[in-house]
Image (tube, helix red, strand yellow):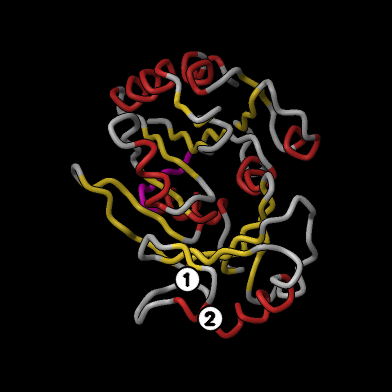
Amino acid sequence: MKLIASDFDGTIFIDGKIKTEDIEAIRDFQDKGNLFGLVTGRTYHSLFVLIEGKIDPDFIIANNGSHIFVKNGTDMIEILKYSLDQDKLRDVIDYYGRTYPTKIFTDKDREVDRLEDLREGEEILSLAIYSDHILENPFQEDFSFHKSIGVIDVINSAVSKQTGIEFIKDFYGFDKEIIAIGDDFNDISFLEQTRLSFSLNYVKEKEVLDAVNFKVEGIRELIENIDDVK
């Protein structure tokens, strides 16, 4: 059995669509008894509306590792959730919110602009700071910053895409090297942890390329040549 952990935006979801050839390759890979999962900075709900009826992942690591789901029959069930402390997050918003637009993402499939807009019982999964710049993180004890194109995702400092993958490996009892593919800065944490790491041919960012050992045109090419990778 093999396990592929794939980023979504820019890796599978490109120019607003998922290629039919990638969908078919993923299904064929899973039909052979392998595991395929998505690792994304998106919320679970914003991802699901884009993949429903196209990709049926065995697991989803959402919010950069803060929210994890696995397939149980025909359903996806939540098995891990790391939320953010509201009082401590207020310090981050006060610090950067005067300069950059921010958005709060909750576990109830909602986006709000202010902490005061949260509903009773609603938990915060991440804060987005919309900036093209790499911002310093003075709050490292409680939060980690994950840079992507045009946005910095603020999540619980205890998690990352890589910790999410380690959790998934333990969940499935998978003790082999995973196959990882991604295209952006927030993928580096899990790309650099495996020898079987891939990016896409169009990627130019040196930091991303330094974290991988192989380049492919896309998921289909990776899957078709997976047995040749040593």
* Residue hosting label 1: 124
Vertical placement of 97 versus 148: above or below? below
The residue lying furthest to the left in this view is 73
Give the residue at x 66% y 24%: 214
Q: What element carries label 1?
A: strand
User: In the image, residue 164 lies at what x, y percent?
Assistant: 49, 54
Q: How many labels does the image show?
A: 2
In the image, which residues are magenta?
171-176
Judged left or right of residue 209, residue 2 is left
Mark 1 → mark 2, Cα distance in angstroms: 8 Å
Tag 1: amino acid = Ile
The answer to which image quadrant residue 129 occupies is bottom right
Give the residue at x 63% y 40%: 191
Quarter placement of the N terminus: top left
- Nearest the viewer among 221 and 173 is 221
Judged left or right of residue 136, residue 198 is left
User: In the image, residue 21 lies at what x, y percent?
Assistant: 42, 15
Q: Is residue 173 magenta?
A: yes
* Residue hosting label 2: 86
> What label sits on residue 135 in the rendered view?
none
Q: Assess disc 2: are there few (<14), some (14-19) or many (≥20) residues with their C-alpha within 10 Å of its C-alpha.
A: few
Contact between labelled residues 2 and 1, with CB atoms less than 8 Å apart = yes
- Nearest the viewer among 80 and 114 is 114
User: In the image, residue 102 lies at what x, y percent?
Assistant: 62, 64
Q: Assess disc 1: are there few (<14), some (14-19) or many (≥20) residues with their C-alpha within 10 Å of its C-alpha.
A: many
The majority secondary structure of the magenta stretch comes to: loop
